[in-house]
Amino acid sequence: MNPQAVIFDMDGVLVDTERAYQDVLRAFFRERGLEIPDEELHRLAGGAGGIYQKMIGLWWSRAPRLSERDLELGPSAATGEAFEQITDYGTLINPGVRETIAELRRRGVRVALASSSRREKIERVVRDCGLTTCFEVIVSGEDFTESKPNPAIYLHTLGLLGLPGSACVAVEDSDAGIAAARGAGIPVAVKRDERFGYRQEGGTWMLDSVGDLIPALDAYQG
């Protein structure tokens, strides 16, 4: 297959942030007397439907040792400060990302990014990873009332590219992301991740790493 554009998800696909975020939150709430079960932490992966704010609020209400400063800041700001310990997202870039994007661009394939994350965070990740000039289009989920699995973010990205979904490929890992891309009519290459209980169904290709994308597209006979 020779797509006209490839649209990448960010967290879990370009950078291995899901585990890093979970480790930060586990440590944050442990210091405040709450042990978070893995199955609850794993619900954050993919960031579907505002689940992050819901779970942070739930854990906050359970934590027995919130400090005066915690209470002054509130759950979003207090946990946001904890995330500042991630000082360089470039250390979390997944194998094959830079090489794959470079080869796509060499072939004349347009490259876009559609992430549920806030634009400020997207810009920082892209900068830290040395990908600032790589994406023709960058779309943030904060611009939409509903996050993935709603296809709005992908439909908007297609509009900016001026392409139909069938002319593109999305690279996703989470079930919410896969559903969003498919809902916009985009075939999906799924980056395998067995750590968070994803089902990862409905993709056209299954990749062990982002570096497998181009060989998979080249070999596709569909």
Image (cartoon, rainbow, N blue to C red):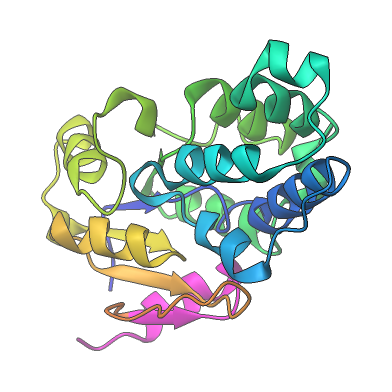
Where 213 falls versus 22 (above or below)? below
Residue 16 x/y as whole percent: 68, 56
Residue 216 located within the stretch drawn in magenta = yes
Q: Residue furthest top?
A: 72
Q: Which image quarter holds the N terminus? A: bottom left
Looking at this view, is 21 or 36 the one in front?
Answer: 36
Residue 160, quarter of picture: top left
Where 204 falls versus 23 (above or below)? below
Total tally of numbered discs in the picture: 0
Residue 25 located within the stretch drawn in magenta = no
Residue 206 x/y as whole percent: 44, 82
Q: What residue do we see at 48% from left, 71% from top?
A: 213
Residue 107, quarter of picture: bottom left
Residue 33 x/y as whole percent: 84, 47
Where 1 falls versus 130 (above or below)? below
Q: What residue do we see at 65% from left, 45% from top?
A: 62
Is 48 on the left-hand or right-hand side of 161?
Answer: right
Q: Residues in magenta?
A: 205-222
Is 47 on the left-hand or right-hand side of 100?
Answer: left
Is residue 140 visible in the rendered structure shown here?
Answer: no
Looking at this view, is 103 or 49 the one in front?
Answer: 49
Is 124 on the left-hand or right-hand side of 144?
Answer: right
Residue 179 x/y as whole percent: 25, 63
Q: Which image quarter holds the C terminus? A: bottom left
